[in-house]
Image (cartoon, helix red, strand yellow):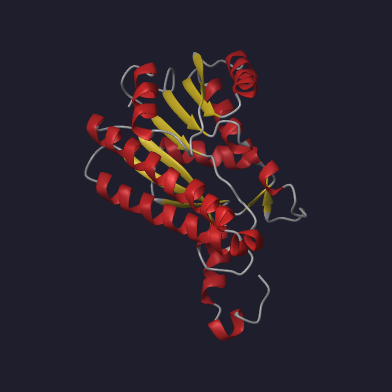
């Protein structure tokens, strides 16, 4: 692994609030970043901001990450980074609408395709590179929604549960090497993705707080699964422990 200065960072979903906040931390340490997302103009704005914060280099990478030739796209990214990578961050996602997904196949498929199938493809391809170079870290963002199926978001939860198991398996495969993988499971985070949800209280976190957790995790992966913030591990443990006959009476 290289030092903090000039670390090579791939940010998939760089326009997400958490992705941008995490990129700022790396920029302040002089990292070289690829910012991947769909909106080139917005990516350019973010890139200029990161350069002003100290990034050694910021490459804007316009792509529909959920609908592309993953292998070819990654190979081109890798060439831009000089053939190796220190940290790959997988941020993009689609919350979708549960009720709509129940009744419309297009919405159902979109939630699963974006949050699991496309993310799984990226994770697998990146993991092969990390294994080949015997270094580097893959961090994928998941959700506590995948810890137990609930009527309010079980399609999204199923996709995130699948991603969690996939990353956990990749971490197990990479364990004999110097490469690593980790999934960060988020609770409530105040982002545009959750703009429609009423916010407030100690359970809600800001993107900047989550970004610090992600950066700390990437610096030294101690476990393949990290809850962010930490207390969600215990909240979900309680929720998973509720007997079915009681749980089915709730409106969670």
Left or right of 71? Residue 16 is: right
Q: Residue at x 62, y 41 (%)?
A: 209
Residue at the extreme bottom: 245
Closest to the observer, 35 or 181: 35
Q: Residue at x 23, y 32 (%)?
A: 132
Closest to the observer, 180 or 91: 91
Left or right of 33? Residue 74 is: left
Q: Is residue 16 above or below residue 153?
A: above
- The quarter of the picture where the N terminus appears is top left
Closest to the observer, 53 or 151: 151
Q: Position of residue 154 (x, y in %)?
A: 56, 64
Left or right of 175? Residue 108 is: right
Q: Position of residue 250 (x, y in %)?
A: 66, 77
Q: Is residue 120 above or below residue 244?
A: above
Left or right of 4? Residue 13 is: right
Quadrant of the image occupied by residue 220:
top left
Query: Quick check: can you spot residue 144?
Result: no
Query: Quick check: can you spot residue 212?
Result: yes
Q: Residue at x 44, y 43 (%)?
A: 118
Q: Is residue 111 above or below residue 80?
A: below
Total labels: the figure holds: 0
Q: Residue at x 27, y 37 (%)?
A: 128
Quadrant of the image occupied by residue 92:
top right
Q: Position of residue 240 (x, y in %)?
A: 52, 72
Q: Position of residue 252 (x, y in %)?
A: 66, 70
């Amino acid at each position: 692994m290289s030092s903090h200065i000039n670390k090579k960072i791939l940010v998939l979903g760089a326009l997400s609030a958490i992705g941008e906040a995490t990129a700022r931390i790396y920029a302040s340490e002089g990292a070289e970043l690829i910012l991947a997302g769909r909106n080139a103009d917005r990516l350019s704005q973010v890139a200029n901001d990161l350069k002003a914060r100290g990034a050694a280099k910021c490459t804007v990478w316009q792509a529909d990450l959920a609908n592309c030739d993953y292998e070819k796209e990654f190979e081109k990214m890798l060439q831009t980074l000089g053939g190796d990578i220190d940290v790959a961050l997988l941020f993009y996602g689609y919350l979708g609408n549960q009720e709509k997904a129940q009744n419309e196949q297009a919405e159902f498929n979109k939630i699963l395709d974006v949050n699991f199938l496309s993310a799984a493809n990226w994770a697998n391809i990146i993991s092969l590179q990390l294994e080949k170079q015997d270094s580097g870290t893959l961090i994928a963002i998941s959700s506590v929604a995948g810890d137990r199926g609930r009527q309010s978001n079980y399609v999204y939860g199923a996709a995130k549960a699948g991603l969690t198991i996939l990353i956990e398996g990749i971490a197990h495969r990479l364990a004999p090497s110097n490469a690593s993988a980790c999934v960060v499971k988020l609770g409530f985070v105040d982002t545009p993705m959750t703009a429609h949800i009423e916010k407030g209280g100690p359970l809600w976190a800001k993107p900047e707080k989550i970004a610090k957790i992600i950066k700390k995790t990437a610096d030294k992966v101690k476990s393949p699964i990290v809850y962010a913030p930490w207390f969600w591990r215990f909240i979900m443990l309680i929720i998973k422990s509720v007997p079915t006959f009681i749980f089915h009476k709730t409106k969670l």
